[in-house]
Image: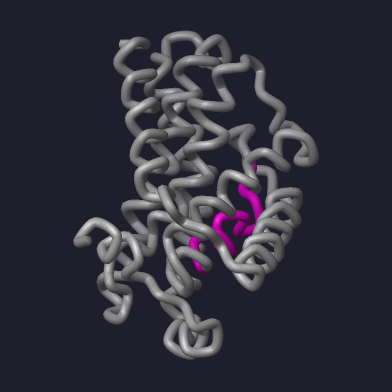
Amino acid sequence: MTILIYTIVALYFITCAIILKGNKPSLKEVCLIGIISAMALILRCIRVPLPTGSSIALLGVLPTMLLGIVYSPQLGIISGLITAMLSIVLVPGYAPVHPLQIFVEHFPALSVLGFVGIFDCSKKYKMVLGSFISIALNVLFHTVSGVLFFSQYAPSGMGAWTYSITYNLSSHGVEGIIAIFILTILPIKYLKKTLGGNTNVIRENFSR
């Protein structure tokens, strides 16, 4: 099972490399990535504790998702990777307990938020679908990490998977659902027009 998990993670990073291949952000895009990463980092530092022992970040996933929708998935992925690197150093409690946790949880869980823009988000239902897929993968990476690196904290009689799923759904899952709801009420079309975003970049690259 462990080998399978690491194989899937490796395939994820290969997919990201293919998507980002040849992508050279402009100065404006670099500035945008920096602003979004800073916003995500600040929000990730503000947490609401839960009775389960977990906590909910104050919508730390929202800036990266918004960048992936409004501008492009590539910028969302890059921003997620940068946010992950900075979170390891700056966000309390986010330091890895094992070096491999960085590659199983930290990098993929935050960069996958950029995938929210893989569909043509001109229709709200497509944006919501992309958001649910992105959040589901985010929770999955956190859950797998919980099984691999935190199973010793599972209560007696509770399996590692049950414990990790319960823990992460009550924290990252809830945060993701709230973020999706907020995305549905934001003026996405106006933001796209203002920033000159393009959410079809991935499909354009693959169709060449």
Q: Can you say whether 30 is above or below 134 in the image?
A: below
Viewport quadrant of the C terminus: bottom left
Viewport quadrant of the N terminus: top left
Q: At 70% across and 65% down in the image, what residue appears?
A: 35
Residue 162 is covered by the magenta coloring: no
- The span picked out in magenta is 55-66
Quarter of image, res 59 = bottom right
Quarter of image, res 27 = bottom right
Residue 56 picture location, percent across and down: 62, 48
Q: At 42% across and 10% down in the image, what residue appears?
A: 157
In this picture, residue 139 sits left or right of residue 85: left
The residue nearer to you, when weighing 198 against 122, is 198
The figure's colour scheme reads one colour
Residue 22 picture location, percent across and down: 43, 53
In this picture, residue 121 sits left or right of residue 191: left
Residue 96 picture location, percent across and down: 66, 23
The residue nearer to you, when weighing 174 against 126, is 126
The residue nearer to you, when weighing 21 against 135, is 21
Residue 77 picture location, percent across and down: 49, 51
Q: Can you say whether 84 is above or below 146 in the image?
A: below
Q: Can you say whether 126 is above or below 43 in the image?
A: below
Residue 63 is covered by the magenta coloring: yes
Q: At 40% across and 43% down in the image, what residue appears?
A: 16
Q: At 26% across and 73% down in the image, what residue appears?
A: 125
